[in-house]
Image (cartoon, rainbow, N blue to C red):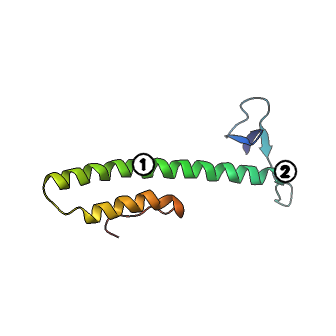
Amino acid sequence: MAYYKIVGTQVSYANTKLDEGFIALTRDEEGNISNPELLPIIEAEKTKQEQAEFRAERNAKLSEVDVMINKAEDNGEDTAELRAYRQALRDATEQWVMPVLGE
């Protein structure tokens, strides 16, 4: 069973009922969610969390590619592919797809 606490537009999630105010997302005998009014709020919070995780991964990759570009420039190597990858990382939040170096 999942528990959710809603305060304004903020949703907290827990696997167990941690304190007062957490609401169980339950199903009736037919498998229908008994409190469907929570679903849009819960889905919005899940999306927000997934996007934050995506951004964190993207930001780490941006830091890595910056170092790679600096090293390549120091060695007099071509950085066009690395720069294109860096730009693709910057643009990744437009469609929420993580680019891969070399593609």
The kind of residue on which mark 1 rests is Asn
Tell me the element at label 1.
helix
Q: Nearer the viewer, residue 78 or 49?
A: 78
Q: Is residue 18 above or below residue 96?
A: above
Residue 5, percent across and down? 75, 38
**Could you tell me which quadrant the N terminus lies in?**
top right
Return the x and y of residue 85 as percentages of the image width and height.
35, 62
Q: From this viewpoint, which residue is outermost toward the top?
A: 19
What residue lies at 31% left-to-right and 49% top-to-bottom?
Answer: 64
- Give the x, y percent position of residue 32: 83, 59
Disc 2 to disc 1, C-alpha distance: 37 Å
Residue 81 shown left or right of residue 56 in the figure? left
Query: Of 70 and 15, which appears nearest the observer?
Result: 70
Query: Residue sitting at 74 percent across and 43 percent down?
Result: 9
Please tell me whether mark 2 sits on a helix, a strand or a loop: loop
Answer with the quarter of the image where residue 16 lies: top right
Location of mark 2 (residue):
35
52 lies left or right of 98:
right
Type of amino acid under label 2: Asn
Q: Please state which of the two labelled residues, at mark 2 or mark 1, is closer to the viewer.
A: 1
At 67% from the left and 48% from the top, the residue drawn is 45
- Disc 1 marks which residue? 59
What's the residue at 85%, 61% (across, down)? 30
